[in-house]
Image: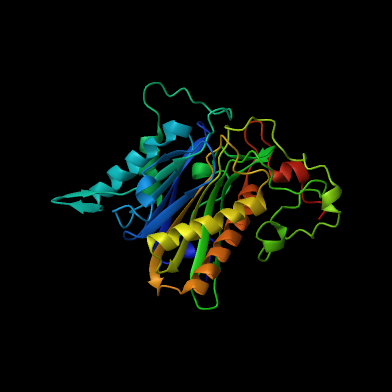
Amino acid sequence: MTRNLLTDVPGIAVGNATDPRLMSGVTVVLPDRAVAASVDVRGGGPATAETDLLAPSATVPQVDAIVLSGGSAFGLDARGGVVSALASMGRGFAVGSARVPIVPAASLFDLVNGGDKNWGDMPPYFDLGRQAVAAAGPSFELGNAGAGTGGKAGALKGGLGSASWTLPDGVVVGALVAVNAMGSAVLPGTGGRFRAWMLERGAEFGGLTPPTSPLADLDDTEGASDVPAGSNTTLAVVATSAGLSKADCHRMAVMAQDGLAVALRPVHSPLDGDSVFAVATAQHPAPDMNGLTRIGRAAADCVARAVARAVWHGESLGVYPSWRAQYGLSQY
């Protein structure tokens, strides 16, 4: 039975560490062994670490974990906590007698969301990273959790979302998204219908009736944020059970970015850090070119669905109302 989470991909666990007072947190994607991975960065102002080694031409073949966090540049300290925790488990890339955990990371900007950021000389993200590793498992919370704790989506509360899909050949594809977007996830003038409505499976983000208004004639400012570009960033991890190379993972990440473009508008602004990581657990054989295309398409759909689920599960926090607070459910 699937959970409609990234962890439906065999060999993947996810852990969240959430600090409600801080209004921030950390999410770690933890494979049960090192896996092929890559990344595609579209935002113009990313906060990242260890992403260069994900290029197909780079030497290190696999990663041990991927970290998403709030906190902007401060949040990159979470990577150190994850590295420390994995080193204590004996995990990492062998260099002589040493093992170095390979842990790429990216952070989103939630420093002005109203949380208590007076942490003095020691940002809390290192400890949150260790806590996220300890919490890793097959089930995890959505909405105001982990890296999505302080996130927004336009004028609404964002959060952490996830979705999965199994292809006809049994290959599983999943996505995890920490939504902190300048852009809106809802269609203007439709009473809160999600931009990704046509991709919904079951009632995973409300099962709302399709929009009926002529969208081209509507004012596209509804749901938009007055926070300037650079105060945002949406981060995602997509995974598949297929046996992909680093180059294949990069193509998967590139295609998965389309899910952000479907579910959010605008996206990939000059100062935001929108980034998508891709990992492959190789539980199924390597696909041919057509198979890789199907995986990439499914990854994009899962990303779009995960964005909507993040907003659907988000709870009002600070100045950002939740979707439910803004639109309610009685009209449906």
Say if 122 sits above or below 149 in the image. above
206 vs 160, left or right, is: right
Residue 144 to residue 226: above or below:
below
Position in image of residue 46 (x %, y %):
49, 38
Q: Quadrant of residue 244?
A: bottom left
Q: Residue at x 54, y 61 (%)?
A: 299
Pinpoint residue 311: horizontal percent, then vertical percent: 64, 47
Outermost residue, left side: 97
> Residue reaching furthest bottom?
169
Q: How is the image coloured?
A: rainbow
* Image quarter (top left, top right, bottom left or bottom right) of the C terminus: bottom right
In this view, the residue in front, 76 or 43, is 43
Q: Answer whether residue 137 is visible to the viewer in this image.
A: no
- Residue at image point 63% right, 42% down: 315
From this view, report whether residue 159 is shown above or below residue 170: above
Provide residue 245's location: percent of width, then percent of height.
38, 64
Number of marks in picture: 0
Quadrant in which residue 319 is drawn: top right
What residue appears at the point 71 percent right and 53 percent down from the top-left corner? 195
- Could you tell me which residue is drawn at 57 percent across and 32 percent down? 230
Q: Nearer the viewer, residue 329 or 157?
A: 157
Q: Residue 27: x percent and y percent?
A: 45, 46
> Is any part of residue 261 visible from this angle?
yes
